[in-house]
Structure formats: C-alpha cells, structure tokens
Amino acid sequence: MQILKLLRNEGPTSRIDIARKIGITKAAVTIITNEMIEQGIIYEKGEQLPKGNKIPRGRKKILLDVNPTYKMGMGLVVDGGFIYFGLCTLKGDIIEKHMNAINPEEKAEDIFAAIEKLYQDIMYKNDLKPGLVAGLGVCVSKEYYGMLKVNLEPDGRVDYSGLQERLSEFVAVPMAFGTLIEGVATAETDYNQNYEEERKDILVFRYAKDFDCAVSIGQELYHGAHGKVLDVVHYKIADGPECGCGKNGCAGAVLSQERFLNRVKEVYSPEKTPILWEQTSGLFPKVADLFRDPDYIPQDMPVLKIFRDTGDVYLSLFYDMVLFFDPDQIVLFGEGEAFEYLTEYIIKTSQGKPADFGSKILARSEITLQNVFLAAASLATREFFINKGGF
C-alpha cells in the first residue's frame, strides 16, 4: 500500500528512492517490488534520466510505476437527470463512457434496469471477468436518495446499504460509495499525472444545484471527528436568505443556483434585460438552460452585476478558506458557461490584491460532465487497489 501510494503521489520512482522515502531497507523493497512485478501490479518503466548533462556513475536507477491496466476501474454517477457510467484504467485513462438521460416519468426500477444494461454491456464488450475489475464506484446526488434506496441519517451520515443490496443483484465486483464531491476530490489527486504540481492538500467546491465542498489533506479525504469538517453549506458568509438550519446568510443559501436564478428573475424583463429576454423568447424557464450552454456569455448589465456579486461572495469565502486551511489548491467543479464566467471573474479579481492567490491556488477541476464517472471510479480504485496494496 505504501509503495502504491508513493507511486501514485510522485510518479515513477526507483527502488532505492522508495526505500529512502518509506523508511525500510532496499533489500525489503526489492523483495516486495519483485513480487508486485510478478503479479503484474507494477512494472519497470526504464532507466532514470540524468539531470542536466551530468553522467551518473555506477548502476543506473530503474524506475518502477503502477501498471495502469493491471485492473480496470468502473464508475457510476446518478446526478442532474443523467446516468453516467464508464470504464477506465487505474490511472484514469478513459476506455469507455456513457451518458443516459433519465426521463422525469421514470421509476426506480427503470433506472436500475438502465444501470444493469450499461454494466453488462461494458463487461461483455471489453471481455471483462469480475477479477479484472478493481471495483465499481457509485455516487448518487441527494435528489435520487429516496428513489434509489439511499438513506440520510439524522446525524448526517449516508447509508448506502439499500442501494448496495439492489446493485448486488447484478454487479459482481466490489462496490465503493461516496458523494460526488468526495469522488471529485479523490480523482483530482489520484488521477492527476502532473507530478511536478504540489497537490497534497486541496479543497474542492462544487457550483451546481447543490453547493458542496470536500477536503483532502495529505491526499486523503478528511471528514473530521464527527464527519462534519468544513460544513461550508452552513458557513455564514453574507447577509442573505434564511437557510434550512434557521440562520441567515449561510453559503448554501447565498450561493445556491436557486437564489441566483431568483435574483435574475427579479430583473428579467424586456426593458432591463433585453438581450436575455430575446435569447429566451420571454420565457424565464429557458434561462437556466441558457446558463448551462457552453457558448453563453452574460451581456445585460443587471445580469452581469449578479454574476459579479456572486463571484465576490465566492472570493470572500475562498479568502477565509485559504486562511483556515492554507491549501495547495482550491479546485472549482461545475458546469456550463455560467460556471466558466464565474471562475474567470474570481481568478482575475483576486490577482493584484494583498491576498492574491488567484493564479496560484484557484484551479478548474479536470473532472467535467463528459468524464464525471471518473469521480466515482476513483473511489473504487482508492479503496480496492491503493488501500489494499493491489490485492
């Protein structure tokens, strides 16, 4: 496990460097890694290149790395009216992915039937036996909890046992469960192959229907003593609407997409927002779809002001998070042009100020809707490959 974590975090590494960094003898590392090579878990990638023009003396270091195709990872995400299902390598290279729309009229059994078909098709087309799959990661958004037999306990914990029991009727591989934001945080560290980039401590924020955050310290998800670390949804950041907890100005209420759209609705008219009015034919329900359009750019001044006000609130929140956690990165996960505009505004506005961190700390997530199944797959890869030493 320690060797796999080291290779995951730092990339290809020689036996002598593994011994030095883990703190065991080179002889022990040689025995363990030779066994891992025989099993196919890792492989010898080649000689370590010398730095600069200096010619190394003695035996050259042979670099070891994870064999990405030793096993496959599977991911299932049910979120925002879609089923996302896919297959990838242990390093997150996509082999196959699918996105199926969920009709509002569909019932739970319709969704389970669609998931079963996707699972069976991927196993058959890729000639996979259960032993060749590390596991299936599963992430379900709150709107589908009741339908898919997921229970939210009074203490805030999520009970996936009902969903696991139902999926076990056709899934023959181990399953790992977690929230989508936890999956994104795991994928950002485990599937990031830019080893020169320091990303040990990260905060991941989601801009979507459900505002959420995950904390990863030392490349491990951190939940706190009671599973409520950085309960940012109820963190007071500004004067604003009442939250479900009874307080005013909580981040979840102030930065929710519902409040954002309500603010736009207040100014939505042919006089104040003529461009938006024309783009949506005077039908406000079309505004939300337009904001998800990758080609949309806000042009009416009242709409621009709402975007910038929202960006300023995010910026205030991020300043606090930087002071509290001092992370290597704050990663923004979202969708649509509205998210892109907000991200760009936040980064530009933060630069040049006393607490300038925009270009240094803020980053867009590499997980998008097109590859979001990777967030779930990373949970399975972490639990059933990394944490079990490949076995």
Image (cartoon, rainbow, N blue to C red):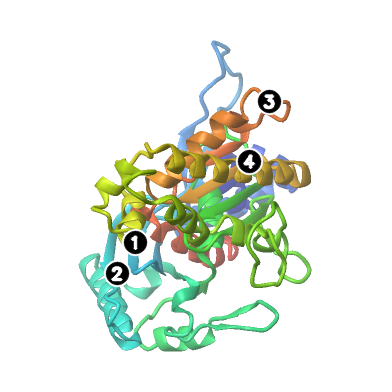
Give the labeled residue for mark 3: 353
The kind of residue tagged 4 is: Leu
Mark identifier at residue 87: 1
Left or right side of 321 for 106:
left
The residue shown at (68%, 42%) is 316
Left or right side of 135 for 60:
right
Mark identifier at residue 16: none
**Mark 2 or mark 3, which is nearer to you?**
3
Mark identifier at residue 128: 2
**Mark 2 or mark 4, which is nearer to you?**
4
**Mark 4 or mark 1, which is nearer to you?**
4
The kind of residue tagged 2 is: Leu
Query: What kind of element bears circle 4?
Result: helix
Give the labeled residue for mark 4: 315
Query: What kind of element bears circle 1?
Result: strand
The kind of residue tagged 3 is: Lys
Q: Using the rendered image of the protein, determine whether residue 217 is visible from the camera's viewpoint.
A: yes
Question: What percent of the width, then of the height, locates residue 347?
Answer: 55, 33
Q: Sequence order check: which comes first, mark 4 or mark 1?
A: 1
- Neighbour tally class for label 3: few under 14, some 14-19, many 20 plus, Cα within 10 Å: few
Q: Sequence order check: which comes first, mark 2 or mark 3?
A: 2
**Mark 3 or mark 1, which is nearer to you?**
3
Q: Are marks 2 and 3 in contact (CB under 8 Å)?
A: no
- Neighbour tally class for label 2: few under 14, some 14-19, many 20 plus, Cα within 10 Å: some
Cα distance in 3D space between marks 4 and 1: 36 Å
Cα distance in 3D space between marks 2 and 1: 11 Å
